[in-house]
Every structure is written in C-alpha cells, then in structure tokens.
Image: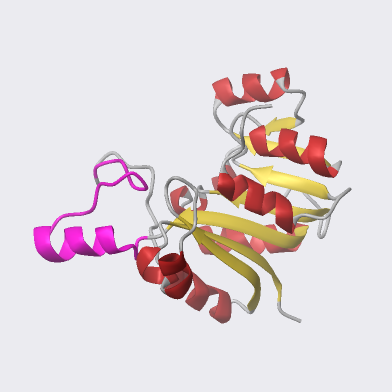
Amino acid sequence: MKRLRTDLVLIGEWIEEGSHVLDLGCGDGTLLAHLRETHRVTGYGLEIDDENIVRCIKNNINVIHTDLNEGLSEFADQSFDYVVMTQAIQTIRRPDELLLEMLRVGREVIITFPSFGHWKARFSLFFKGMMPVSRALPSDWYDTENIHLCTLKDFERLCRKKWIEILERAVVNIDHRTTTTMKLLPNLFGEIALYRLRRRT
C-alpha cells in the first residue's frame, strides 16, 4: 500500500476498529482501503468523478455515484459509526446543511478543510489586496471549486450555532505535518484543519 498522508493517518487514529464508515467525496478510495486493512472497517464511498469511481472499483471499494449537493436522504438515521469528508466541505453549495445530514446518518463526523485564516491568506489579502493562491488554495478565484472558504474560528462558530460538539481538533500544513506554532496558534498557522464531531446532547 502507498504511504498514507498524515491527515489520513490522523483520521485513522480517530476511528474505532470494526466500525461502519461512510466516506463522502472518497476519491480513489485510499482512505477506505487503509481503514479496511488496518481497522477492519466496512462501509461505502460516495464520489461524483467517473475516473475515481473506476479506481475505487479496482481497489474493491464499495462506491456510489452521487452529487453531495443533493444530500444524504438515501441513508437512514445513525446508519454509520462515522461519516468522513476530507477537504471537500468548502466545495458544497450548503455546507451547513450537509454537515447536519452527516451528523444525522453518522454517530460521529470527521471533517477536514483548508483554513482561510492561515497567515499566507491574510498576507495576500492585506498587502496585495488579492485573493490568496497557495499550495493549500492553488486555484485563482475565478476557477476554484472552493466556494465557501472559512477559518477555524468560523467553523467552530458554526458548530456552536448548530449545537455540534467538537470532540477533537488537529491542524497540519500542506505537507500534512504539524508543528509547535500550529498547536499554539492553530487559526494563524494551520493550513488544513481536522475535526471530530458529534451531536451535542
């Protein structure tokens, strides 16, 4: 198996062995394949890209062709232990609604996204007056798939508003490594945020 990205390794550490997992925007199925081999998980991936679906099938990943903007109405309440979405929530038309849907069908949710609060993004806006282009946000404003960018503080404010409990948080850089400065000032130095969530009771 190819070497796994650090953020995906962290996600694996948050998932219990033998769990039932739904991976939204699963790509080529790398995460599910890793979890199947290391944690004996079962589950499905949802993906819209035809080439990625073919790769999932080659990797023996159960994959469903779907547009996440249409929601998760085909899944029953609490039908998965975990619902995972890596670096895709910012591409969804209504990320707040999808997040609630994820919490409806999963006992816990694990989500990652690029942080717009990173110092490079702030520098570009303040000193250049331009939307940032970086390794974490590589596209120009007019051709990006990222339509709802946010900072860690924005996301945590949404969680409070929607009565979502944050169980764990981690931040990494684009190389999927963490540093002391990221731990001390995550909203300023974290390029990619990872959260483990559940409904507040």
Q: Residue 53 lies in magenta, yes or no?
A: no
Query: Which percent across, then down, holds residue 94?
Result: 49, 58
Q: Is residue 168 left or right of residue 117?
A: right
Range shown magenta? 116-140
- Quarter of the image where the C terminus is located: bottom right
Is residue 112 visible in this depiction of the protein? yes
How many badges with numbers are in the image? 0
Between 66 and 2, which is closer to the camera in this rendering? 2
- Quarter of the image where the N terminus is located: top right
Q: Quadrant of residue 28?
A: top right
The residue positioned 64% from the left and 19% from the top of the image is 54
From this view, report whether residue 95 is shown above or below residue 40. Answer: below
Q: Residue 117 lies in magenta, yes or no?
A: yes
Query: Which percent across, then down, holds residue 160?
Result: 56, 80
Which residue lies most toward the front here? 180
The residue positioned 56% from the left and 20% from the top of the image is 51
Between 92 and 171, which is closer to the camera in this rendering? 171
